[in-house]
Image (cartoon, helix red, strand yellow):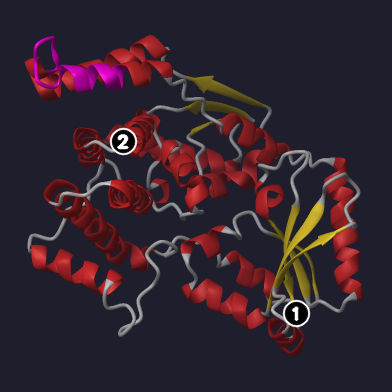
Amino acid sequence: MLITYMIHHILRKCTKNLHRGRGRSPAVRTFRRFCLCALQQTDPCVTMQMRRGKSLRRSIAVCSSFQYAILLSAPKEIRLQRVKNRSLEKSGGRMLPGGDLYEQERRFFAFAASRDVRWKYLENINKAGSRKMYTHHKESIEILKKYYKEQGAIAVILGGSIAKGTERADSDIDAMVVLQPEDHAGKAEAKATAETINGLCTYSGGYFDIKYMTKEYLTDLARRGSEPARNGFLGAKVLFSDDSEIEQIITGIPVFQKAEKEEKLLSFYSDFWLNYYYFLKSCPIDGYMRMRTVAEIIYSLYRMILQENEILFDCNRRLEQQVESISSETAELVERARILETSQMAEDADRFVEKFYEITKYVPPRDLSEVLTTYAKDFQEWWREPRPNINEW
């Protein structure tokens, strides 16, 4: 199969909500139908965007047929000129020499010019499509299967970077081991429901990173699990199972929960509002509190971006990478966030927030009391009426 692989936002807009048939013009709807038809009929030419989240999951089924991937991207000079043009349209003469925004914009342009955003999609396509697993990983996984079959496990599920196709040669092997309830209870009593096992892998430094669980846990996870917990099952593969229902349960875990979307958007927006408009803009804060406030502003808006794109949050370690990989617009948002992380200055926070408002389609509540009430429930009253941990939700 030949993929014409486009990075920029035009194709992103065309392929977004592919299965929903939405679009502002007949041309966009026609293009979406073409993409869907090609995916379903294994057409010799498929034009689509590959990214984390459901687009990538939907595409993995046909990745094994890919022969080529062509990367189309605008030259860096053109992209930088677009950035400057957008700033000029928005700020006018204020960004020119002598203007009050000149120094701020000059710093940002210098930072943007120093950045070389290298998209990792082609590497991921190759790994997800060809599935050429390292030989020592294959050998070690066979040992893993044999080891837990002899231990009487119900099932073993491969997870982590190897399952997702993003592993390195020295990556460890992540697995979820399903036990009988009484066996799991023994692990829980011994405080050993998670462990690493050394000495069984066939390569130097290799080890098994094991999480023990029950079928009941997997069922609960599919029904009401957090996003990081769900994300942990992206690409997961059942290595063996003595229970025919396990595999079906697994398929229902790494699924974005649309029913929670609006509630989460409100919670993250409320976290952002208090930290940006109150703590940063209205309070004399410094040191630890300023660092924490800036981190919360960035975190909450990043989470809103993921929610709007219906992408499962992985973890804080990979949050920035997730947001950056969505589009050229979100990549610019991340660039501004990195400036803010270093400076912690209010004016850099303003530029970061301005970019977010350019991207988002979220409409905040008109009544500020709804925002304040949500923040109070999430951060002050959670002990009385249990609420999800907003940092792991």
Asked if the stretch drawn in magenta spans residue 134, the answer is: no
- Quadrant where the C terminus sits is bottom left
Q: Residue at x 31, y 85 (%)?
A: 384
Whether residue 176 is visible, yes or no, is: yes
The vertical placement of 83 against 271, above or below, is: above
Which is more N-terminal, label 1 or label 2? 1
Q: Nearer the viewer, mark 2 or mark 1?
A: 2
Quarter of the picture containing the N terminus is top right
Q: Bounds of the magenta span?
A: 95-109
Nearer to the camera, 178 or 41: 178
Looking at the image, the residue that sits furthest to the front is 287
Q: Is residue 99 magenta?
A: yes
Whether residue 149 is situated above or below residue 6 in the rendered picture: below
The residue under the point 45% across, 19% down is: 73
Front residue (pair 195, 259): 195
Residue that badge 2 annotates: 340
Q: Are marks 2 and 1 in contact (CB under 8 Å)?
A: no
Q: For this view, does 45 lie left or right of residue 325? A: right
**Horizontal and vertical percent position of residue 229:** 54, 64
